[in-house]
Amino acid sequence: MTTKSIKRGTKKTVGSSSTPLNKAELKAAIVKHLHCSLGTDENKANNHAWWKATCASVQEHVLEGLRKTQKSHYLNDTRAVHYFSAEFLMGRLTSNNLHNLGLFEQTEKALNELGVNLTDIMEEEQDMALGNGGLGRLAACFIDSLATLDLPAVGYGLHYEHGLFRQEIKNGEQIERPDSWRDYGNPWEICRPESIQDIPLFGYVETKYGENGRVSKEWHPGHIVKGLPWDIPVVGYGGKTVNVLRLWQSQASDYFNWDVFNAGGYVDAQKENVQAETISKVLYPNDETEAGKELRLIQQYFFSACSLKDIIRRYKRAHGDDWSRFSEQVVIQLNDTHPAVAIPELMRILIDRAELDWDYAWSICSKTFAYTNHTLLPEALEKWPARMFEKILPRHLEIIYEINHRFMDQVEAVWPGNNAIKQKLSIIEEGAEKMVRMGNLSVIGSFAVNGVAEIHSALVKKDLFPEFNHMWPDKLTNVTNGITPRRWLKACNPALSQLIDGKIGNDWPLHLHKLQGLAEFADDAKFQKQFMKIKHDNKTQLAKEVFTLTGVEIDPNAIFDVQIKRLHEYKRQHLNLLHIMALYRRLLENPQYDIHPRVFLFGAKAAPGYKLAKDIIYAINKVAEKINNDPRVNHKLKVVFLPNYRVSLAEKMIPAADISEQISTAGKEASGTGNMKLSLNGALTVGTLDGANIEIAEEVGDENIFIFGLTVDEVETLDRKGYNPFDYYDNNRELKAVLDWLDSDYFTPGKPGALSSLKRSMLEGGDPYKVLADFVSYSDAQALADKAYKDSAKWAKMAILNTARMGKFTSDRSIKDYVERIWKLVPCEVE
Ligand code: CR6
């Protein structure tokens, strides 16, 4: 694909955009919706009704933008990216939409005059938690940037009825409760029954011999399910381009239940309904682990197939049966391997339906897909039993065998007679049970493969796919992750945003490198004071929230030390915990022990089946209980585990953080994105040289970050040498004492051993994530952070420089990298 062949998309524009709503119009619209959409009035309406009426008023405006955008894209026949992702962790949409439309302040005033507080009513919105963590939130930031940069794009995913579970903490333990984000309807989504798709599943394949000698295949599916699209408008900053996130809901199709119904089997027919509707029922709650469940493969196929049909329908409207321009118009980004089954699905459509020959079909297909890898952890690399694949998608398995067969010929040409390499690169893993490797399929079927931070991409080339990299040296590349500064600074930290506006102007949300302009005030005592006053106010605000949620009182004058992310051993929340216990012990041994008071705040969900992760949550809560209630600590230490960590809670915690914990074992965190959000809001990172931390350190400078621990190379060396955690346990008095403490009943009165599983994992278990090896270095880095905080001018300067130097990490930059390195898109302005 050359840039030349891409049609420029800036020629034709549609109409003029509707004038932004003014305060009076907003007031009128809100009241109208209270009356006419919600059937209530100003005197009766509760916060929920006010919130819905506000959304409905704004949505009118959004939909106008959507219509114009779609018309522009259609008229200009634009090339578009289609971001296929099983997860979109959108969070709340109201504040973001208002900010992106430039309507936030107007709306706030309009509501004020109606006697309503915008901040309060926005609390009515349930998070749209259709994702597990970083990967899903990245997708949400990316579609924000795509719209902001006026790029033609569609997000495609699943309309889960239940998003990630709601976490409750009972007696220190995580309890999972169903999430019901749409219980009372979602004012931002639009149902599109006119674009329903039929999706086949199961059944068998028939080989057909045509008169002309052509052998063809016909898939006779056993079931058809319907895919019903829900559109969520994605408003770019500035409000011009409004793209769409299209999420598919599964429904029973008439295809298989009418007969039963007519025969009087009403109840049985409903059973089939239930089965079909299960597909989009619930998000799998595993982050970084593949589930291997039949339903998950069906989910993946369901949304990939719906989305492809949708794309092809749109393409055909412009190009009829001429497939020659397909890969010029359509690029599909696979967000991890979850939608990789789209590759054989497109082949199936091209060969079985459009009757193209294999080579032509493959030439189209392999210019259409690009794949992002998000992890090196082996447990996350998806594999499906071939037998399961065959049962659900018999024709696709045949196609995969064919892709593989032809690919093996290529391998043979590069490494003649080398069976070991063939085995390694094959899409099919031979063994007791034949497996389909989705990673290999994704690399083979894509024209570009990227990792998500420099170090991660380097490791993808060196350790994960070295042979593929040898075969196609230009295929593997890097695009470092990013975050949208609209949500993660402008909307979540209004006071800081205003301070920044006053100093450097207000276009930084679009040009984040302009934050650099703050650096010249880093030494300015007045600016330092203003900056730290805002931090303090944000901490006061969070302290109130913490009290409401947990009953624990925390002091905004303490250091707020924050670790917020999924609970995973590789992220090492237990390293943080061991250090907290060490501090506690030091305080008990020496009440004069000189540390600045510190509050350790955690937010983390554990996958429901991940026992040790749940044990770590329990341990954090038990240690917290003890420390928070021990008068000898003299308020120097508090530990808080905030339940149900989610996007909307992150938006409250991040602006209030002083320290950002990014302490994964080097080589394990592909990128991280929370690290960027925290630093952008003026928190200093205590972190390892892992993922994007490395690039953050490069940007902020070594003197403005607390780096500790083994490097990737040192981890490798240690592994080669043979790592023995007992070497550290036996030789460090403090570490030993802290670990042994876990065996006692000190934190769990009457229940000795309740925390022992943690200790076991770090000793007999071999400490796979090298917690013990990094403990001393971590503790030293924390001591340095403590010392730095005591010098308030120094700390303020460091915090300001963190904010000032985060320009690189805007997701706009990531998207521009994708456009330049992979997608070759042209913006299409919507007037
Ligand atoms: N868990 C990585 O672990 C990265 C995001 C987004 C992750 C994390 O470091 O920032 O993706 N990987 O690229 C997967 O989900 C497989 C994540 O969120």
Image: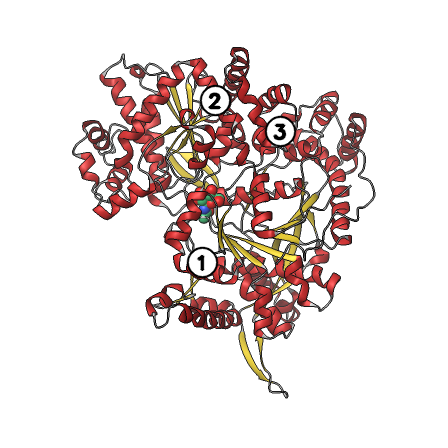
Q: Residue furthest right?
A: 15
Tell me which amino acid carries mark 1. Answer: Gly
Residue 330 at x, y percent in the picture: 64, 57
Q: Which mark is residue 338?
A: none
The quadrant of the image that shows the C terminus is: top right
Give the residue at mark 2.
Answer: 799
Q: CA distance from mark 3 to mark 1?
A: 38 Å
Mark 1 or mark 2, whichever is nearer to me: 2
- Answer with mark 3 or mark 1, whichever residue precedes in sequence: 1
Residue found at x 76% / y 47%: 67
Residue 240 at x, y percent in the picture: 73, 39
How many dots with numbers? 3
In the image shown, does 319 or 652 lie closer to the viewer?
Answer: 319
Give the residue at mark 3.
Answer: 508
Q: Is mark 3 within 8 Å of ligand 1?
A: no
Give the residue at mark 1.
Answer: 439
Determine if residue 412 is in view.
yes
The quadrant of the image that shows the N terminus is: bottom right
Label 3, secondary structure: give it: loop
